[in-house]
Amino acid sequence: MVQQEPEELLEMSSETRSILEEHHLRPLWEVEDDMGRVYGDLEPNVWKWEDLQTAIDAIEEDVPIADLPPGFQRRVAVPINTSLGNAISNTIYVGVQTVSPGETAPAHRHGANALRFTIDGNEEMKTVVAGEEFPMENNDLITTPQWEWHDHVNDSDETAAWLDVLDLPLVLDSLNAKNTFEYHELERQPVTKTQGYWDSQYGRGRPAEEAKRDDIPGPFEGIQDPTPPYRFGWDEMVESLEQRAENDEPDPNDGYSLSYVNPASGKPPLFPTMSFRAQLLREETDPHFHNATEVYFVIEGEGATHVGDEALEWSQWDLFVVPPDQIHHHEPDGEAMLLGITDRPVFEAFNLYAEAEPSS
Ligand code: 1HN
């Protein structure tokens, strides 16, 4: 639909207007101007790691997790799009979280899907998900599927930092699903599984009887292949990317690119609401545009992503967002690796996804 500026109000007689008002009604030709205006148009913003680091250091110094008010109880610097008030996009939320040595980010669960991508981690920094301790080593990607208990425990002597990605604006703003959050009675949930348990049941083998996950409140009954708690180790992922580069042609828009699979289905998307790609770029990509939003995290290297007539310059650990419908392409300076995050699965689920090349 073509966006139009609201025109001058069509004259209705004041009697007609007051009849409508009295009955909590509005005429469509006035209502339609208010549709599609809850969110402003996303801006192609970039956050430099240097600035993110300054911010996470400052809040770490200032605010112990234990002093945070009731709520999510996480110490996070949250990139805010200049067109929005609470997130980098109207579907995807990202944040940079720290946990200091000895600290715990307390256990809770919620209806939003989440994942961690480790920026500065180590073996003794653990995110505990659904009873298992997952070590957070650099560039590991670890899922926290909706409804699973999770807490983060730093038993090391170094501050750990990572990227959080959640479908929070979709859940809390668009769907307004507010009663989907619960604290655990304990600060740390009991560790009930041995390390490697979730991988052992989904990575290579599957229990003969369908795994029942009836300890969680979400409507999993009948839902196909809910994403399990899972750690994608970076060593294996980078090996897969290198194999791809060695053997296959690059995707014109994404370079050598692999989507993280939902281990339960063996296919992307990782979550019903968000898909994730590891991308190895060796050359400039072709421009295209689509109505899904993309958020990128720079795993390694430097370069620029051209969005419309803006160039977003990036280097390691920067974050940036490519708004819907804007023509964009990547221009790495040498070799670079990106984590690509998209809300495309939501568009696809509703038969709304569209993608095209610019007409030259
Ligand atoms: C959450 O659960 C975490 O578990 C981080 O680390 C950020 C932002 C909003 C809602 C829940 C976490 C979050 C969050």
Image (spheres, rainbow, N blue to C red):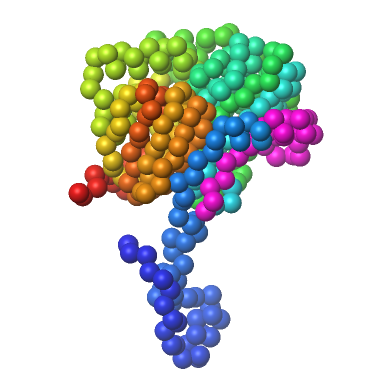
- Specify whether residue 210 is painted magenta: no
Residue 13 lies, in percent from the top left, at 46, 91
Residue 110 lies, in percent from the top left, at 59, 35
**Front residue (pair 103, 71):** 103
Quadrant position of the N terminus in the picture: bottom left
Q: Is residue 123 left or right of residue 327?
A: right
Can residue 71 be seen here?
Answer: yes
In the image, what residue occupies the spot 29% across and 33% down? 285
Q: Is residue 83 left or right of residue 329?
A: right
| 199 in relation to 26, above or below | above
Residue 208 lies, in percent from the top left, at 40, 12
Quadrant in which residue 180 is drawn = top right
**Front residue (pair 40, 69):** 40
Can residue 169 be seen here?
Answer: no
Furthest residue to the right? 67
In the image, what residue occupies the spot 53% across and 75% down? 24
Q: Is residue 108 left or right of residue 315?
A: right
In the image, what residue occupies the spot 58% across and 8% down? 194
Residue 287 lies, in percent from the top left, at 28, 41
- Specify whether residue 64 is painted magenta: yes
In the image, what residue occupies the spot 38% across and 12% down? 239
Furthest residue to the front? 333
Quadrant in which residue 356 is drawn = top left
Residues rendered magenta in the picture:
56-83
